[in-house]
Image (cartoon, grey):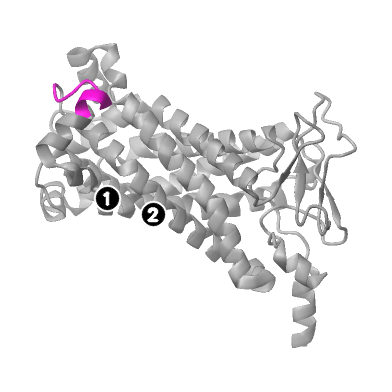
Amino acid sequence: MDSLRQQSLIPSFLYSSSSSAKTFSLSNLHSERPSLSPPPSSTVTMGSKSSGGFVIPAPSESGKKIEMYSPAFYAACTAGGILSCGLTHMTVTPLDLVKCNMQIDPAKYKSTSSGFGVLLREQGVRGFFRGWVPTLLGYSAQGACKFGFYEFFKKYYSDLAGPEFAAKYKTLIYLAGSASAEVIADIALCPFEAVKVRVQTQPGFARGLSDGLPKFVKAEGALGLYKGLVPLWGRQIPYTMMKFASFETIVEMIYKYSIPKPKDQCSKSLQLGVSFAGGYVAGVFCAIVSHPADNLVSFLNNSKGATVGDAVKKLGLWGLFTRGLPLRIVMIGTLTGAQWGLYDAFKVFVGLPTTGGPAPATTPAVAAAELTKV
């Protein structure tokens, strides 16, 4: 039984469960009825020889099951990442547009309100959504890799650590999994981000992705699309590490200290509300940690042949950390909260539990290890 548990390991801190039974109720997570009363088959079964691991019934087809950490599971997480990141980033394009221009031309775009006024006078209402296509496509690709690979690496590193160390050092699992996922996600995002910044900060350069990409490649070559990759990693990796680790921790604390009943007894709407709240608070931390690199990315993608030293010299250290920060806190907080809300809503829709939750009681494997020490 111990070997079977290790082969299908889902660390105790990843999803809420009970350590005293082999069947875990997920009522209210994927009920087909508005009353949220659980159908008889709404269970997650561990150790079944027929399943080989954890299986969760999908809400739309009671006979169809999504096995945790199976190809279908990762496909669902990837699709959820596409929806959560692509749609949310496209929605806040006007805020992103003003932020980028404040970073590039602070003399002209002195504040958030005046920045919107300048754009409205010079480009009209349509100008607020300039660059929305590379934003949608780029962040959809990034979201697919970010969330899909995060779930993969979280499981992979948990298996490497084993049940005892995975539970003990769960925050390190979150940090390592999210960092690994973001390295891949930014490779997918970088070309779209380069074109987006150029389109948004240089009026007349191009109307969007279709004509902006060929112009960019012609001017700077195909490798020019990746000249901002290292600063992008510098912005996004700390951002994503903070995004996932702080979210998981905040959600666990909310269920532990603020909600007087177990997670699996909470309604779906309450669980999704917790996901949004945890995501918003995590987003504020993300914005602060990643903002200097965000200024560098905007500066390098806007100026041909510019270096990091040029950016520091022009912006100054104080400007590097603070220019455009208040607007970015509002934007990233809202963005991150919405992303976690959409991602977990999609997981619930396909029959999976929401992300995060209280750490259950010590698992038998960990308890046995502690008794051995005594």
- Residue identifier under label 1: 229
Q: Residue at x 65, y 36 (%)?
A: 272
Comparing 192 with 374, the one in front is: 192
User: Percent x, y for residue 7?
Assistant: 71, 65
Q: Residue at x 77, y 73 (%)?
A: 365
Local secondary structure at mark 1: helix
Please tell me in which quadrant of the rendered image residue 327 appears: top left
Q: Is residue 248 magenta?
A: no
Give the amino acid at mark 1. Answer: Leu
Rate crowding at label 2 as few (under 14), some (14 to 19) or many (20 or more) other CA atoms within 10 Å.
Answer: many
Q: Residue at x 20, y 54 (%)?
A: 317
Q: Is residue 205 magenta?
A: yes
- Return the residue found at the far front: 50
Find the magenta span and give its range: 204-212
- The answer to whether residue 42 is above or below residue 150 is above
Mark 1–mark 2 Cα distance, whole angstroms, equals: 10 Å
Q: Is residue 19 visible?
A: yes
- The answer to whether residue 249 is above or below residue 330 is below
